[in-house]
Amino acid sequence: MITLGPIGLAASNPYTDDAAVVADEARHAELLGFSTLWRSGVLPMLEVAVRATASLPVATGIIPVSQVPAADVLATFHELHRDHPGRFIVGLGGARDAHPLATMHTYLDELDRGGLPPSARMLAALGPNMLALAGERAWGAYPYLVTPSYVGAARAALGPDRNLAVLLMVVPVTDREMARRAVAGPLDFLARAGGYRRNLLRQGFTATDIDTVSDRLLDGIAAHGDPSAIAARIGEYRAAGADQVVLRILGADDLAAARTRLAATLIG
């Protein structure tokens, strides 16, 4: 049984097809003591990360169910479970159609029939309906662009028996404008429209907050500053009910060095 430890790491090169890069980062994450490595839903590279490490659980953040057939997920899961049991957490999301809940239900039905248990999968849930589904049919939820207040409400909705891993933008710089620029890139891509924008609005941010990356938004959904300030911010998410905070490190010239410095403070 996988234990979802306190500090995870999101891959710095999530979409690369360079196996050497993927393997090196996975080994470094394991060496530094991160609890989980979260990669994109590119299944061959996820397999590389699992096979390059000895015990580090590797999760997909996320497999887009509207693009990746359930049969492919099942094949990868069973192969890795045979060779490296308990090392692959199947993170699912991306049901981008008119009926996302129905699409996800259908996909989960296929996984059930293929022998992939709920205890091995997480859903990238944001809204109340998808959170409820994560509580019913998965090991837990994996939200992004959320505040500690959101985490508290999500924990209450999921209940104590489900896991909550929160992806958090972490910018290890003390200059606020540099941090704002680093956060603006992902926000421009994700929060222009769709579910992430709707969820930010539900959390009380305005369209202006989102479009300008206001101080209120920057401080609300990211961690920035020196390692001690970042540690304090992560502590707020953990106190609100996150089982794991997953670091998406941005704005650092040397990402490997930034991982090392943060791990020294956060993991010891």
Image (cartoon, helix red, strand yellow):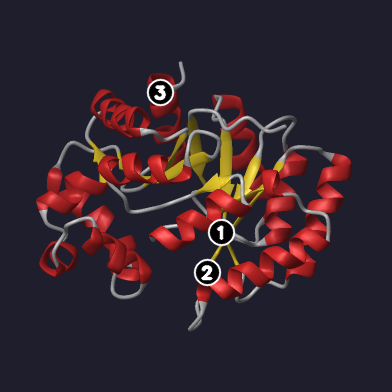
Element at label 2: loop
Identify which residue is drawn at 34% across, 42% down: 151
Residue 217 on image: x %, y %? 17, 53
> In front: 256, or 158?
158
Q: Is residue 73 visible?
A: no
Q: Earlier in the sequence, mark 2 or mark 3?
A: 2
Give the residue type that dot 2 points to.
Gly
Element at label 3: helix
Q: Earlier in the sequence, mark 2 or mark 1?
A: 1
| Mark 1, other Cα within 10 Å: few <14 / some 14–19 / many ≥20 | many
Residue 76 on image: x %, y %? 79, 57
**Which of the labelled discs sits on residue 98, or is there none?**
none
Horizontal side of 195 relative to 182 (left or right) equals right
| Mark 2, other Cα within 10 Å: few <14 / some 14–19 / many ≥20 | some
250 versus 7 height, above or below: below
| Residue under numbered circle 1 | 62
The residue lying furthest to the right in this view is 82
Residue 254 on image: x %, y %? 40, 41
Q: Closer to us: mark 2 or mark 3?
A: 2
Residues at badges 2 and 1 in contact (C-beta under 8 Å)? yes
| Residue under numbered circle 3 | 266
Residue 228 on image: x %, y %? 26, 23
| Mark 3, other Cα within 10 Å: few <14 / some 14–19 / many ≥20 | some
Element at label 1: loop
| Residue under numbered circle 2 | 94
Q: Which image quarter: residue 33?
A: top right
